[in-house]
Amino acid sequence: MMTSPKVPAYVLGVGLTKFLKPRGKAGIKALLDAHLNYDDVDLGVACYCYGDSTCGQRVFYQFGMTGIPIYNVNNNCSTGSTGLHIARTMVQGGSAQCVLVVGFEKMERGSLGTHWPDRENPTGTSGLMMVETRGLTEAPGAAQMFGNAGREYMEKYGATAEDFAEIARVNHAHSAANPYSQFRDIYSLDDILASPMIHPPLTKTQCCPTSDGGAAAVIVSQEFLDARPHLKSQAVLIAGQCMATDAPSLFDRSAINLIGYEMSQRAGKAALAEAGVSAKDVRVCELHDCFSANEMVTIDALGLCEPGKAHEMIRAGHITYGGRCVINPSGGLISKGHPLGATGVAQCAELVWQLRGWANNRLVPRVSVALQHNLGLGGAVVCTVYKRADGRENEEVGSEVAAKVSGVGYNPAVEARGFTRVQVDQVRSRKHRSEWALGETQKNVEARF
């Protein structure tokens, strides 16, 4: 576990597609945002769960065929932030100066299931423990596992079904201001409680949807940034980061521990410690709310509340604007959507926009530090702490100002738009491009826009 970086690493550019169907290419947006050409990139990381081997090369070759190393990453729902962790590690170790991370997913309709029934399921031991301790219903397996954790939190600490519904209500309310969200409808608490029951206490509107979408980020070294001082004002420091996997407590018969409570707790503590801050300093957080129950449990695991008091924090209104810590200003997975490979990178994009002050229609004010949590059963979790490079608190930036410096010609934090053919040409490799590799991509993108 790395606790002190050899060299700083920064997020210099981010890009996102609307979470519904892929509309445009997030990597192009990220390079435009970073004001870079693909020739500046010396390592690529592709993040996806549902696709054949070397999908990453198919994506990156459209930018250019420069011969750089390209990693293909699959780490369940934490795939995107695993890619960010790889990028930072490479930058810290001096193996790369500029890394492009692209997360993408095209998912099948309905609940997640196995694609390899002829071999052992990697989460099979967790499933057996769930059946032995809590039984089995006809609900989707993930909903049962996370719902059971919610039940245990109710049994141990006194949370109610209304507390879990309030989490979903807040996230859906937040998503109304996010142009990339799959769902932007606002619901009352009664609406949430009255939606179809999936696995108590989880109703349908408390469960994330399957989604298509893409997200990208450019991670650079201090040396790379120093050579481009005109870009320092938009750079966001990765001040702390930890990737963790499960402990033996996973199988101690606790439904809460069965969804990775201990690894979330360990990763959160390590990332915050490396950044030199505490959970009390965090006023904005993108948290892996695949189900409202996971948000409840993870608020506790990350130390955003006193142990066993997450439901009290929720009742007091402290997870939304005007409260102690705004959790998921993007709308979270529940409402924004959850294309597995893109989710962790999309969380990064939201927090970068918050710290820059570009998310002016949903800005959490006076923020200088932001926390990200991205979890995958099986298991892996990545927690990341971001800070403004100048150490100051964020200030709201008007969209006209953001548009002038964004590289895409508009404020991407508040508008989910595309790009032009000229902009595509601007970021593609100047010397090592292949029109054959590009295929029909440009024509398809232009048709959508």
Image (spheres, helix red, strand yellow):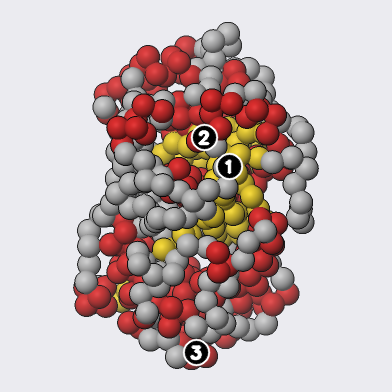
- Mark 3 vs mark 1, CA separation in Å: 40 Å
Q: Percent from the top left, x then y, of residue 306?
A: 55, 81
For label 2, the SS is: helix
Figure check: 37 above or below 59: above
- Mark 3 and mark 1 lie on one chain; the one further toward the N terminus is 3
In front of the other: 164 or 443 = 164
Give the amino acid at mark 3.
Answer: Tyr
Mark 2 in CB contact with mark 1 (< 8 angstroms)? yes
Q: Percent from the top left, x then y, of residue 71?
A: 65, 36
Tell me what residue is drawn at x 34 percent, y 32 percent. 401
Q: Percent from the top left, x then y, of residue 149?
A: 51, 79
Give the amino acid at mark 1.
Answer: Ala
Quickly name the residue at label 1.
389
Figure check: 185 above or below 227: below
In front of the other: 198 or 283 = 283
Tell me what residue is drawn at x 41 percent, y 39 percent. 16
Quickly name the residue at label 3.
157
Looking at the rendered image, the disc whose residue lies closer to the viewer, 3 or 2, is 2
Give the amino acid at mark 2.
Answer: Ser
- Mark 3 vs mark 2, CA separation in Å: 45 Å
In front of the other: 77 or 54 = 77
The quadrant in which residue 86 appears is top right
Quickly name the residue at label 2.
233
For label 3, the SS is: helix
Say whether residue 369 is left or right of residue 421: right
In front of the other: 353 or 31 = 353
- Mark 2 and mark 1 lie on one chain; the one further toward the N terminus is 2
